[in-house]
Amino acid sequence: MILTIALLFTTLPDMPVAKPSEPLETRYTIMPSQRPKFWDKPGKSALIANIGLLGFDMGQTCHNLSSGGHEDFLPVHSCAGAVGILSAEAIAAWSGAYLAHKHGLHKLERILEWTMPVVTTRAIIYSKQHNAW
């Protein structure tokens, strides 16, 4: 008991001071030169696929409308109106992809980039199944 009381009144050596935390290693930080680019290889291939398929779909739609056919999913029945609507859809999809890229949502960016070619391919297949051209 006397030993316990003696230990309470004796001075203990100072505890070592903790070292300041070190910054993260450079491999875990994204440098400005390492940021993903919007027009990288997958983005360019999605754009090329989108332009090719959209051009074919617009040609098929205009031919169908000029030969007396009708489009089920378009509210207009003229070639100029159909091209305007399809172009506006493509611009909206690519604008959404660009905004997702700017906010760092790169998976959403890829989804939006590849949504338009998939939708256009489905429209071409639907038109072929219904003998549009």
Image (cartoon, rainbow, N blue to C red):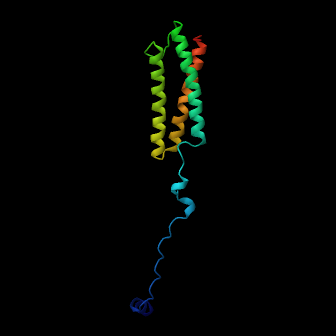
**Residue drawn at x 48%, y 32% as measured from the top left:** 93
Indicate the position of residue 81 as horizontal and vertical percent values: 44, 18
Indicate the position of residue 9 as horizontal and vertical percent values: 39, 91
Q: Nearer the viewer, residue 73 or 7?
A: 73
Q: Quadrant of residue 44?
A: top right
The N terminus appears in which quarter of the rendering?
A: bottom left
Q: Quadrant of residue 92?
A: top left
- Above or below for 33 versus 109: below
- Residue furthest out toward the top: 68
The C terminus appears in which quarter of the rendering?
A: top right
Q: Nearer the viewer, residue 22 or 40?
A: 40
**Residue drawn at x 41%, y 91% as measured from the top left:** 11
- Above or below for 58 versus 25: above
**Residue drawn at x 58%, y 20% as measured from the top left:** 124
- Residue furthest out toward the front: 80
**Residue drawn at x 60%, y 14% as measured from the top left:** 129
Indicate the position of residue 80 as horizontal and vertical percent values: 46, 17
Indicate the position of residue 2 as horizontal and vertical percent values: 42, 93
Count the labels in the image: 0
Specify whether 11 is left or right of 41.
left
